[in-house]
Structures are given as structure tokens and as C-alpha cells.
Amino acid sequence: MKQLEQLKLSGQLPSPRGVALAILEISRRESATLAEIARVVQTDPALSGRLIKLANAASHIARPVVSVQEAVVRQGMNTVRQLALGFSLLDQYRSGACQAFDYQRYWSHSLLMALGMQALGARVHVAAPDELFVCGLLAQVGKLALATVYPDDYNAILMEHPGESEHLRSEHERVRLETDHVELGVVMMSDWGLPKIFTGPLAHYEDPDHPSYPQDSRSNSLMLMLRLSYRLADADRRPQLARDWIGMAVELDIPQEEAGTFIDEVIAAWQDWGKLLKIPATALPSFAEICHGHIEAEEEATEHDAPLRIVVADSNVFTRRKLMAMLVDGTEHFVYPAENGNAALALAMEVLPHVIIAHCDLPLLDGIELCQALRATDEGRRMHILLTANDNGEDQLLRAYEAGADGYVPGNISPKGLHTRLQAAHRLVKLQSDWERDRAQLRQIAAELAVANRRLANVALTDLLTGLPNRRSAMDQLEQAWSAASRSGQPLSVMVVDIDHFKSINDTYGHATGDMVLREAAITLRASARREDSVCRIGGEEFLVICPNTDLKSAMQSAERMRSNLGARRIAIGQMDKTITASIGVAMREPGLADLDALVSTADQALYAAKEAGRNQVCTRHQHILPA
């Protein structure tokens, strides 16, 4: 929990901005009114349209909602706040620094899950449909948070454990990051005011082995709804959708004969909302096709059937609409209009289209300048750019290719000619897809090699018997500590610890018992040392303790604590419980010591003095101190 509190205070977690932040602040006031919220919402046309659309989708009243004020009243302050927050996060985090995290797929998945929850809410009356929409939209927000706060570490987790279930991946997240996407997401949603009834189901719905809530409870219904919506939204599992979905839907009293219609309606709404929010929502087979095994035809579709994102930039409304009509006729392409060059450039950077068809005579930024601006960016170099003009002469064609265009579209092109030119774009998309897949495989191989190398390096620096750093690691650490002490002028001390009469233990009871004694001694020494000290095994029954920023007096006190704790530990040796003792030599870095070898040698001399004094002692080179 300390880690979560630090994250909350750091300001690094995904958070709302602009209008959403203003709504959040207003709603926290006890005197806040819906009229105030509506006035703030009206300043954001995109948010206004989304709230009105959602109010109409969730309403069973014949008269449609046409104003922001009415939408806010119907949805209520808490729901409007949460919707504004969710949409704000969507607009802000469409991309990010975590390479292996697919931001577009994440939002597509979250949107479909939100619509699934909303539709289920209309049938299972456990919460308002709009609240359930927010619940579904933010159900996986912990993943977005990990990708935002820990882009490199989360990237490594995704690369090292591809294809694992979310529940299993959470374990790797906890090991590496001390939290996981479920825990982090629930904390964030609680802070944002999501109703408490949602937090329990949200924390457990990914775990298939989590015991169910009481059968007739609200929490159990929410758990089932989250699992149903998650499976509906998980495109990778759609071939299993019919069997899994129907089996779970029965528990929510959804008749089997209605399941197909329900899912198809949600998918249709998803594609509709995808266009509004500019989120990929690909064409999916109907529920009936899945049930009858017709999905294979969709999966084996040729590259020319894949839908493209296309920006059409033309200031002439008539020619722009004509071109768009040809592009969407009989296809599933996503087509975005732009009336000038600046709008086309902004739209291209936002939706990252596969194809841009731009007129050379665009206002503000003409087609040639638009092409050059796009080619100057990494994203623009991957786009297939076609220029068009009223003049179809060779000079215009030459200018287009010199600017970096991939082709030229005459003003009087036919639908067949236009779709023929798009074939090159389809090939480019396939090549890019193949390249991305190969690149992902290379990244995975590189990540696996890095993990293997780290493991090998760890083995090379670790004593296999005790798990402590070995002699090689001890010398490396001591060299770093010596250099740091030389730069800072801070003291540095070391201890050499030797287990008393260890040879007789080996000779009398055997090497297996001797190994057990060494392991027990290592555990006690590590537990007795200070957090900043490093305990290493440097050979046989001998240990080295490196104490940075520690003077001789403090090192002697720490050494005495180790000796005392070791002598108090009883170990089963043979048929009896016995204690073991140790002699410890301590030395501090002094002006007369030339290097770290001299420092260790001084500690060795102190260890010899401890043994000469009768063992079970802590000594320095010149003086026997702290006798047993």
C-alpha cells in the first residue's frame, strides 16, 4: 500500500484535464448544482455530443434528449463527472511510451466492454446503465496506469509474458512493480468516486477461481456482468464466445435465444461509437456466424478486404463528398473529411490514417506542403499519400512525386480506378503489419535474451550454497564502495567473519551438515546486518561484510551484534541442538591503507587476533575489543 500512496502523491498516474478536471472540482463542492455542471460541459462540444448520445442510448423515453442541460439532469452529477473523466483519459492517452502496450486496442477493448456493461444494465437492474458504462470503460484503467508510470518495466513484462491471462500477468506485475493493474485500477477508481459497490467485483472478476458472491446478491450480478462484458470485448477469444457467453448469460436470466441479438446490437453500437470517438472498431462476424463456425471465412480474408483509415482533404464540398462516397461504397473503410491542409495535418496526426488523398490546391496548407510536412515525421512516412488536382498535366504529376507522394489521382477518376490505386495501400499495410509482427518477435527474443543474461550474471555473482554474493561480487562491491569513499571522504569499514571450528563439524558430521551450518550462518548474518551493509561469502567458512559510510566504532558494534546473534542461534547438528560461534575481524579505511586489498588484509589480521584470543571474539588489528 505504501507504493500505491507514493504513486498517488507523485502526480504520475493518468488524471483528467481541462473540462473534466473542472467538473471534478465543482462536483466536490457541497453547494454544486447540475446547472453549473451543464454550463461547464457546454464549453466542450465533443463532451456535449458524447453525453447527449449516451443519454439517448440509455433512455427508454420516446422523446430524445437534445440539450446538454437535459442530458446532465438525466445522468446525474456523479455519472456526468465519471463520464467526463473517462472521455478525458481517452482523449489524452491514445498513445504513449510503452512500446508493447497497444493503446488503440486498449481503448477499443474498453469501449466495447463499456457498451456491454451498459446493455446488460438495461436487462439486469443493479445500477444505472450510464454508471455501468463508466465501470466498463475504466475496468482496465490499471493497465493504462502501469503503461504510463512504468513504461519500460511494463513493456518488459508484456514482452516476457505474452499470451498469458490477465490474472497470471498480475503476479508478474506484483513481483516487478510491487503492485498490479487490478489493485492500482481499483485505487484510482475509488479516488475518482466510482460507487463502492463496483470496487469488489472490479478487484476479482479477472480471477476465474475467485469464489462467487451469494447467488442473489448485487455484487454477484456485477461480477457476472463484468466477466460477460470482458469476454465480449476480448476479440482474441471470439471463437469461444458462443459457448462461454451463453453459459454465463443464463445466470443473469438472459434467454439463449436472445443472446445473439443482444451481442449483435452491442457490436453495432461499438462500431457507431468507434467512429464518434475515433477508436478502431473493426467489422466482426455476427453471433449466428460464430455459432455455425463461419468465422473462418472472416479470418482468412485477403489483404484487399481489410478496412483502411482514409483522410480525404479537399476544400470543394462536392468533390470531397463524391470521393468519400466512392471510398465507402461496398467497403468498410473509415473515411475522415478535411476541408483545408491544416485540418488534414491535425487529423492525420490524430487518427494515423493508412491513406491520405489530398487536393493540391488546399487552403492554408496546400497538398504539396501537406505531403512534405507529413514526410518529415515518422508517422507520415508510413502513410500512403495520393495527391489530386484539377490539372492532370505532367508538371502537376512531377510536382506530386517530387513532394514525396506515392501516387496521383486524376480529378475524373472512376470508382474502379480509385480502388485499384488503393491496392498499393493494402500491400503497404500488410508489409507494415508483417514488419511490426517481426519486430515484436525480435523484441521478445531480445527481452528473453536480456532476462537470460541477467540470470546468468546473477548466477555468476551468487554463492549457490548460501544465496549470498560470492567473492567476485564482493570484490566488485568493495571496489565501488572504496571509490565512493575516496570521492566523498566518508568512512568505509569491512568485517571478515570466520565460523569457529568449522573443520571439525565437517569431519565429525559430514559435508551435508557443514553445508547446513553455513546456510544457517548466512541467514543469521544477513538478518543481523544493517540494511545498507552487504554480506558476502568469500570462501569456505569465511564471510566478508562491507559497511559503507561506517566508522570503526559503529562497525565494531554491528560486528558484536552479529557475533551475539550467531551464538544465540541453536542448530540441529547430529542428534543435538548446538550453537555455533564466529570470530570477526574489523578494519576501517585509513590514510595509510593503499587500496582495498590492504583494507581486507587489515581485517584478516584482526580476525587472526580474534582467533589467537580464544575465538568467538570481535577484534581490530591492534586491539582486542568487545570480548565474548
Image (tube, rainbow, N blue to C red):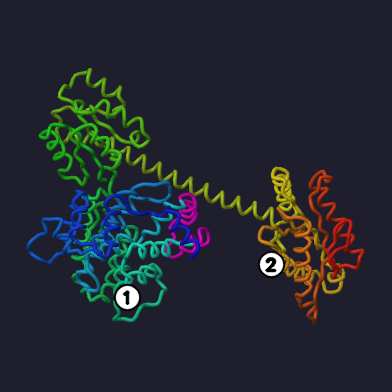
Q: Is residue 418 left or right of residue 86?
A: left
Name the element at disc 1. Answer: helix
Q: Between residues 567 and 176, which one lies in front from this camera angle?
A: 567
Q: Mark 1: which amino acid?
A: Ser
Reply above or below: 101 against 554: above
Determine crowd level at label 2: few under 14, some 14-19, many 20+ residues with C-alpha closer than 10 A. few
- Check disc 2 and report the residue beneath it: 527
The range drawn in magenta is 151-178
- Check disc 1 and report the residue beneath it: 219
Query: What is the CA distance from the residue labelled 1 to the residue labelled 2?
Result: 44 Å
- Which residue is farthest left? 63
- Name the residue: 51% across, 48% down: 445
Name the spot of residue 378 as percent of width and height, x first.
Answer: 38, 35
Q: Mark 2: which amino acid?
A: Ala
Q: Is residue 323 left or right of residue 382?
A: left
- Which residue is farthest right? 612
Name the spot of residue 253 as percent of width and height, x first.
Answer: 23, 76
- Name the residue: 72% across, 68% down: 524
Q: Nearer the viewer, mark 1 or mark 2?
A: 2
Reply above or below: 178 against 512: above
Q: Which corner quadrant of the image does residue 257 belong to?
A: bottom left
